[in-house]
Image (cartoon, rainbow, N blue to C red):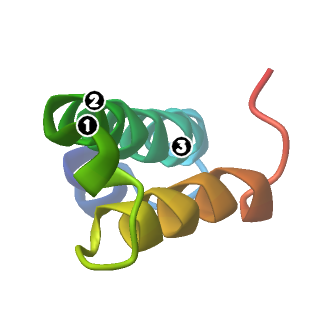
Amino acid sequence: AAALELDLHGNKRARGAIAAAKVAAPRAALAVLDAAVQAHGAAGVCQDFPLAYLWVMARTLRLADGPDE
C-alpha cells in the first residue's frame, strides 16, 4: 500500500503509509524469527545456524529505525 501511494501521490502524501511500513516490516520479521528460534530449540540460539544472527540483526533494525511506540 505504501509503495502504491508513493507512486501515485508522491512522498509527502505517502508519509504515513511509509512510516507504518517501517514499523510493520521489522516487527513481522522479528515475529517470524522468534517462532523459528522457538521451533529449533537450543539450535536456534547457537552459532552453528544463522537464526541467532538473523534475530540480532532484525532486533537491531527495529532499534536503528527509531522508536515505534
Between 37 and 18, the one nearer to me in the picture: 37
Between 2 and 9, the one nearer to me in the picture: 2
In the rendered structure, which amino acid carries the disc numbered 3?
Arg
In contact (CB < 8 Å): disc 2 and disc 1: yes
In the picture of the structure, the residue carrying the numbered disc 2 is 38
In the picture of the structure, the residue carrying the numbered disc 1 is 41
Tell me if I can see residue 2 in this picture: no
Q: Earlier in the sequence, mark 3 or mark 1?
A: 3
Between 52 and 12, the one nearer to me in the picture: 52
Q: Is residue 1 above or below residue 9?
A: above
Question: Distance of mark 2 from mark 1, alpha carbons?
Answer: 5 Å
Q: Residue at x 52, y 48 (%)?
A: 22
Q: Residues within 10 Å of mark 1 (few under 14, many from 20)?
A: few
Q: Earlier in the sequence, mark 3 or mark 2?
A: 3
In contact (CB < 8 Å): disc 3 and disc 1: no
Which callout, 3 or 1, points to the residue nearer the camera? 1
Question: Distance of mark 3 from mark 2, alpha carbons?
Answer: 40 Å
> For the residue labelled by badge 1, is the local secondary structure a helix, a strand or a loop?
helix
In the image: residue 24, left or right of residue 19: left
Question: Distance of mark 3 from mark 1, alpha carbons?
Answer: 44 Å
In the image: residue 6, left or right of residue 55: left
Q: Is residue 40 above or below residue 3?
A: above
Residue 47: image quadrant is bottom left
| Position of residue 37 measured from the top left corner of the image (x, y, whole percent) | 29, 41
> For the residue labelled by badge 3, is the local secondary structure a helix, a strand or a loop?
loop
Residue 34: image quadrant is top left
